[in-house]
Image (cartoon, helix red, strand yellow):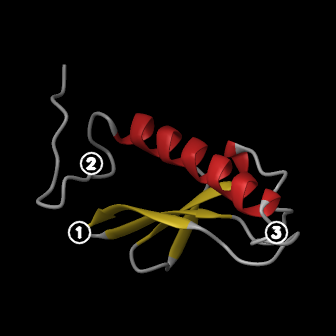
Amino acid sequence: MPVSRRDRWGTTPRGTAGHEERLAAEAAALVAEAARFAGLGWMRATSGNLSVVLGREPLRLAVTGSGGDKGELTVRDIVEAVDWLCALVSRV
């Protein structure tokens, strides 16, 4: 069984044990924060995005998708941006 490996920033590199679990957890946290911010009036409808760093070598981010009401997002609306935002892959 693969052992979870973390890079020097404490993130789980893509393709290693724990990556999918980390992405799922971060996606759930982003959805919750987007809903909280929308409820406070800080993110109206489709304005703004939230993100969290998943890895730094290469840079990987979990980002709220554009065009959706931030108060109504689900984990399926979170995308993973990889390699300096050159490739977007929905992973959840």
* Camera-side residue of 35 and 69: 35
- Coordinates of residue 11 in the picture (x, y in percent): 25, 53
Mark 1 vs mark 3, CA separation in Å: 35 Å
- The circle on residue 12 is 2
The disc labelled 2 sits on which kind of residue? Thr
Residue 75 occupies which quadrant of the picture? top right
Q: Which residue is pictured at 15% across the width and 29% down the height?
A: 3
Q: Identify the residue at horizontal 26%, vertical 41% (top origin).
A: 16
Q: Residue furthest top?
A: 1
Q: In the image, which is nearer the foreground, mark 1 or mark 3?
A: 3
Residue designated by label 3: 41
Amino acid bearing label 1: Glu
Query: Residue 79's x, y, as percent?
Result: 61, 59
Q: Residues within 10 Å of mark 3 (few under 14, many from 20)?
A: few
The front one of 36 and 58 is: 36
Q: Is residue 92 visible?
A: no
Residue at 59 percent across and 53 percent down: it is 30
Specify which label sits upstream in the sequence, 3 or 2: 2
Task: Inspect the image, locate mark 3, and give the three-letter code of the amino acid beneath it.
Answer: Gly
Residue 76 lies, in percent from the top left, at 71, 46
For the C terminus, the quadrant is: top right
Residue 58 x/y as whole percent? 29, 70
> Is there any visible trace of residue 5 in the rendered image?
yes
Q: Alpha carbon of mark 3 to alpha carbon of mark 2: how far? A: 33 Å
For the point 84% across and 64% down, the residue is 68
The residue labelled by disc 1 is 57
Mark found first going from the N terminus, 1 or 3? 3
Q: Is residue 28 above or below residue 59?
A: above
